[in-house]
Image (spheres, grey):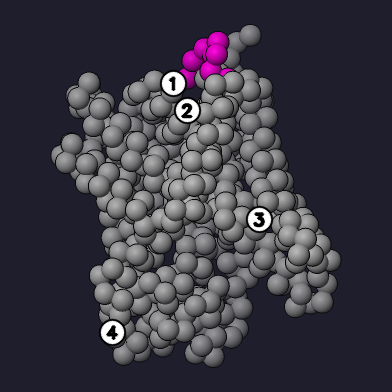
C-alpha cells in the first residue's frame, strides 16, 4: 500500500507560535515566584539569562539538525541519521517521557485552577474526582484533567493547521495578559525591592538557572513539525530562534517587574503574577490575569500532545513501536492513531498516577537528550563537514557544542539521587521495549 504523507501546510509563524505556546505557560505564571523566593531573589533575572544562554546553545544544535534532516521525529530522527537505531531509540524514548510527563503535569495544573474556580461558585466535583489516585486524601481520578486531555487530543487529531489555530489564538491572549501585567506593574515597581540583588550569592543564581531552565522546555516541539512545513530548511531554524528569543525577553521583563513589585521573600505562591497585582490592590486585573492564565495553559497542552503524537508516529514508522501508529488519515494527513495513543497515555498519567515524584524525571531525560544532540552535531561535522550552502549550521564547532555539553552536565549534577533512580528505572523499561520491537524492524524514516 502506498505510504500517505503528512500534509505540508505550516509556515514559520505557525512554528514560532507553536514553540511559544509550549514554552510560555507554567514557567512565567508559576515558576518565577518559587525561583525568586527560594533560589535567586531579584537576581533571578540573571538565572534566566544563564538558562537562556544554555537554551540558545541547544537551539543552535536543534536548528542545524532540523535543517539537515527535515523529517518528523525530532531527536529520534536526528540520532537515527547520525548514530543508528540503538542511539535513536534512547533519544526517542527519553523524549517520549519529556512530552508525556509535561502534558500530564500541565493538565493536572490546569485541573487545579479549574477546581479552585468551581469551588468559588460552590459547584465543586466530589473529592474523589478532583485529583489523581491518593486514597489517603480521598481522591481517585482527576476527572477534569482526563476530560481536558482527551478534548485537546480530539482537537490535535484534526489537520495540523486547524489544530494549531486555537494555539495561535490563545497565544495572543496570553501575550496580551503578559503585556497587561508589564504595563500596569511597571507603575508599582519599588527599586528598593531589587536589593540585595543576589541574596543567595552566585550559587543561588546557578540553582535558580537549574530550575528555570525547565521553563524553556517545549521549543523542541517545533522540530516535530518538520514534515508538515512548506520550507523546513529555512522555517525550522527561524521558528526555533524566534521562540527562544521572544520567550527569554518576556521571562526577563516579567521577572524584573515581579521582583520590583513584591519583595522576593513574599513570592512563595503558586500564582505570582496575579499575586503581585493583588499585592498592590489591583484585584480586578489580578482576576483577569488568573482567568487568562487558566485559558492559555491549554496552549502548552496542545503543543506537547502535538509533539508527542508526531514522535510516536516517527518511531512507529521506523519499526520501534507498534506499526498501527504510523498510519496517516488520507483526508487530513494526520497520524490519528498516534495522536489518540499519545492522548490516552497522557490522560492515564494525568488522571490516575500521582506526578509529584514521577514528573521530576522530566528534567533529567530532557537534559540527557540535549547532550546527545550536541554530541551528535560534533560527530556529524567530523563525518560530513558543514551543511550545504543555504542551510543553517552551528558556528565554532566543536567549541559551542562542547560548552553546551559541559553546562548541561553541571545542571544534571544539581538533581537528586531519587531522580537518578527513577531515570534508571525508566531506562530499563525502555531497554525491554526496544528488545521487543527492534527484531525484524525495517527503518524507513
> Taking 55 as reference, is 164 left or right?
right
- Along the viewing direction, whichever of 417 and 164 lies nearer the viewer: 417
Q: From mark 3 to mark 2, how far is it between C-alphas?
A: 27 Å
> Taking 420 as reference, is 379 left or right?
left
- Along the viewing direction, whichever of 338 and 1 lies nearer the viewer: 338
Residue 253's place in the image compared with 301, above or below, is below
Q: From mark 4 to mark 2, how far is it between C-alphas?
A: 47 Å
Classed neighbour count for the residue bearing mark 2: other residues with Cα under 10 Å, few (<14), some (14–19), many (≥20):
many
Which of the marked residues, 3 or 2, is nearer the chain's N terminus?
A: 2
Residue 232 in view, yes or no: yes
The stretch of residues the image draws in magenta is 437-445
Q: Position of residue 176 (x, y in %)?
A: 50, 67
Q: Position of residue 259 (x, y in %)?
A: 38, 80
Question: Comparing marks 3 and 1, which lies closer to the viewer?
Answer: 3
Residue 196 numbered mark, or none: 4
Q: Dominant secondary structure of the magenta stretch?
A: loop
> Taking 226 as reference, is 270 left or right?
right
Which residue has dot 1 on it?
85
Q: From mark 3 to mark 1, how far is it between C-alphas?
A: 33 Å
Question: Comparing marks 4 and 3, which lies closer to the viewer?
Answer: 3
Queried whether the magenta region covers residue 274, the answer comes back as no
Quarter of the image for residue 375 reads: top left
Residue 354 numbered mark, or none: 3
Q: Position of residue 342 (x, y in %)?
A: 63, 38
Residue 89 numbered mark, or none: 2
Q: Is mark 2 in CB contact (under 8 Å) with mark 1?
A: yes
Queried whether the magenta region covers residue 443, the answer comes back as yes
Residue 158 numbered mark, or none: none
SS category of the residue bearing label 3: loop
Amino acid at each position: 500500500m502506498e505510504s500517505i504523507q503528512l500534509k505540508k501546510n505550516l509556515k514559520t509563524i505557525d512554528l514560532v507560535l507553536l514553540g511559544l505556546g509550549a514554552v510560555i505557560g507554567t514557567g512565567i505564571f508559576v515558576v518565577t515566584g518559587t525561583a525568586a523566593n527560594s533560589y535567586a531573589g531579584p537576581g533571578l533575572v540573571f538565572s534566566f539569562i544563564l538558562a537562556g544562554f544554555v537554551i540558545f546553545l541547544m537551539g543552535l544544535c536543534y536548528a542545524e539538525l532540523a535543517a539537515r534532516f527535515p523529517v518528523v521525529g525530532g531527536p529520534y530522527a536526528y540520532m537515527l541519521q547520525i548514530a543508528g537505531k540503538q542511539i535513536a531509540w534512547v533519544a526517542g524514548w527519553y523524549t517520549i517521557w519529556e512530552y508525556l510527563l509535561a502534558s500530564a503535569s500541565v493538565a493536572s495544573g490546569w485541573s487545579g485552577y479549574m477546581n479552585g474556580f468551581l469551588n468559588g461558585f460552590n459547584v465543586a466535583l466530589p473529592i474523589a474526582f478532583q485529583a489523581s489516585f491518593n486514597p489517603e486524601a480521598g481522591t481517585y481520578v482527576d476527572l477534569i484533567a482526563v476530560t481536558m486531555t482527551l478534548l485537546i487530543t480530539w482537537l490535535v487529531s484534526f489537520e495540523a493547521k486547524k489544530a494549531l489555530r486555537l494555539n495561535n489564538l490563545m497565544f495572543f491572549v496570553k501575550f496580551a495578559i503578559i503585556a497587561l501585567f508589564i504595563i500596569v506593574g511597571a507603575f508599582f515597581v519599588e527599586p528598593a525591592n531589587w536589593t540585595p540583588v543576589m541574596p543567595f550569592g552566585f550559587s543561588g543564581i546557578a540553582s535558580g538557572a537549574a530550575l528555570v531552565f525547565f521553563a524553556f522546555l517545549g521549543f523542541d516541539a517545533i522540530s516535530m513539525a518538520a514534515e508538515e512545513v512548506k520550507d523546513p530548511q529555512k522555517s525550522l531554524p527561524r521558528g526555533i530562534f524566534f521562540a527562544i528569543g521572544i520567550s527569554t525577553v518576556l521571562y526577563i521583563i516579567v521577572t524584573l517587574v515581579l521582583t520590583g513589585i513584591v519583595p522576593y521573600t513574599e513570592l512563595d505562591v503558586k500564582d505570582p503574577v496575579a499575586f503581585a497585582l493583588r499585592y498592590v490592590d489591583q484585584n480586578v486585573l489580578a482576576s483577569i490575569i488568573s482567568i487568562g492564565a487558566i485559558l492559555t495553559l491549554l496552549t502548552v497542552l496542545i503543543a506537547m500532545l502535538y509533539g508527542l503524537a508526531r514522535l510516536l508516529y516517527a518511531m512507529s514508522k521506523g519499526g520501534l513501536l507498534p506499526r498501527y501508529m504510523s498510519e496517516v488519515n488520507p483526508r487530513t494527513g494526520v497520524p490519528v492513531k498516534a495522536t489518540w495513543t499519545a492522548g490516552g497515555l497522557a490522560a492515564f498519567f494525568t488522571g490516575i498516577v500521582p506526578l509529584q515524584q514521577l514528573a521530576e524525571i522530566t528534567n533529567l531525560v530532557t537534559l540527557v537528550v540535549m547532550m546527545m544532540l550536541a554530541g551528535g552535531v560534533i560527530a556529524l561535522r567530523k563525518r560530513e563537514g558543514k551543511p550545504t550552502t543555504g542551510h543553517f549550521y552551528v558556528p565554532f564547532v566543536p567549541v559551542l557544542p562542547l560548552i553546551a555539553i559541559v553546562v548541561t552536565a553541571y545542571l544534571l549534577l544539581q538533581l537528586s539521587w531519587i531522580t537518578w533512580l527513577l531515570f534508571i528505572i525508566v531506562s530499563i523499561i525502555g531497554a525491554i521495549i526496544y528488545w521487543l520491537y527492534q527484531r525484524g524492524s525495517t527503518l524507513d524514516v
